[in-house]
Amino acid sequence: MNVTHQHPFDLPFPVADNRLRVGGVSLDRLAERVGQTPFYVYDRRLISERVAQLRAALPAEIHLHYAIKANPMPAVVQHLAGLVDGFDVASGGELKTVLDTPMPQEHISFAGPGKSERELKQAAAAGIVVNLESEREMELLAKLGAELGLRPKVAVRVNPDFELKSSGMKMGGGPKQFGVDAERVPAMLARMKSLDLAFHGFHIFSGSQNLRAESIMEAQENTFELARRLAAVAPAPVRLLNLGGGFGIPYFPGERPLELDRVGEYLAGLMPDARRDFPEAEFVIELGRYLVGEAGLYVCRVIDRKISRGQLFLVADGGLHHHLSASGNFGQVIRKNYPVRVGNRVVAETPETASVVGPLCTPLDILADKMELGHAQVGDLIVVFQSGAYGLTASPRAFLGHPEAVEILA
């Protein structure tokens, strides 16, 4: 069997006999093993390799945390529990998932602009660090801690006075629902001195999905400077400094991967001053999409071929109800195609243009618009790459009542 370890489209899954292989198994065999389409499959080898790449590129004192919201599948989270240094959750449900793993509770943090009283109580009782996003959360958590007879661990999530330039999704700078505006933080820290809260540090997150090393490097330098200003009025020494993340992955034609080595080298140059100014601090880079996004595939099956006024449509059993982001309805201003291939016959002898659409009664249900996929036949497997993050759980799965997709770790 002739195996090509880097298939012609420069995506990280090998091809043998013109079929994608995932976890050492051909895609059509894997589909039989799963027992249904559509499904998501995440490759544990690629997740492990990405963590190893980060360990090699980033300074040794950087702690690597996984943001659960990118992909909360329990098997993925369990796999990462043995690879990363901590977890960051955004809900009580995600907290339950990570508390089932071996990750020590002191290495779990909770961010989110609308934490309920129940979630704050859960977090306090679990002994994790709560990233405070408002004065209201601070006061309420102090009250809940007193009721529980414990001292909650807290950090302040700061809405910085700068933004991550060229970021696909800006999370800081300007008016934002996330965190506490940097100029309000000193008063909040002054109030904290009279509350029974264990101050741990700061969470400063300015944006995500960035492919420009220069932008991330500038944001990291600005983050340290802001943390220095705020630490001067903090109620205790900084023990945790979450630098955010922002590392992006390429999705569309013309996009180039992030130059990770450049980011790591620049961060290494910032570390001597950081260690001097924050001698007790643990420095955290928090990543979600960058750890799992390229390790995942969404797989659905062609159930019909239709020609409408000269245009070929491949109708599949999966669509936006499982993969909203690939349909272009999860933040794209102008719809662009994710990388999509016919997984059980990757290379066509005679390419033909086709659009892949799902089974839903809406014109928004498009997985690929006018791509060279016309060699697909009924029964063939359509594969959407770059699907390991913000896939199933970020999609309207109940829309029109179609069956659920399943998820596996291979």
Image (spheres, rainbow, N blue to C red):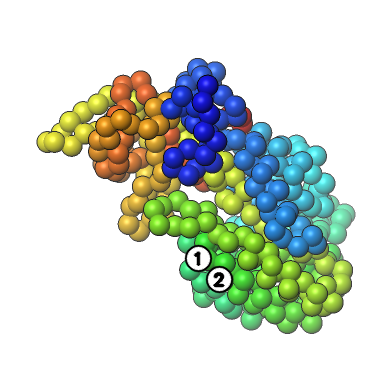
Looking at the rendering, in which quadrant would you find the C terminus?
top right
Q: Judge from the rendering whether residue 187 lies leftward or rightward of residue 410; answer left or right.
A: right
Q: Amino acid at mark 2?
A: Ser
Q: Judge from the rendering whether residue 352 lies leftward or rightward of residue 229; answer left or right.
A: left
Mark 1 — residue? 167
Q: Residue at x 27, y 32 (%)?
A: 350
Mark 2 — residue? 215
Q: CA distance from mark 1 to mark 2?
A: 8 Å
Q: Nearer the viewer, residue 193 or 95?
A: 95
Q: Nearer the viewer, residue 256 or 390?
A: 256
Residue 204 in picture, x, y percent from top left:
66, 68
Residue found farthest to the left = 309
Residue 304 in picture, x, y percent from top left:
27, 24
Q: Residue at x 73, y 74 (%)?
A: 270
Q: Is residue 92 visible?
A: no
Q: Residues within 10 Å of mark 1 (few under 14, many from 20)?
A: many
Q: Contact, CB < 8 Å: mark 1 with mark 2?
A: yes
Q: Nearer the viewer, residue 236 or 316?
A: 316
Task: Give the number of the mark in front: 1 or 2.
Answer: 2
Q: Amino acid at mark 1?
A: Ser
Judged from the image, the secondary structure of the residue bearing numbered disc 1 is loop
Q: Residue at x 82, y 67 (%)?
A: 281
Is 226 rendered above or below residue 149? Answer: below
Q: Picture quarter containing residue 57?
A: bottom right
Residue 343 in picture, x, y percent from top left:
43, 30
Judged from the image, the secondary structure of the residue bearing numbered disc 2 is helix
Q: Residue at x 12, y 36 (%)?
A: 309
Name which of mark 1 and mark 2 comes first in the sequence. 1
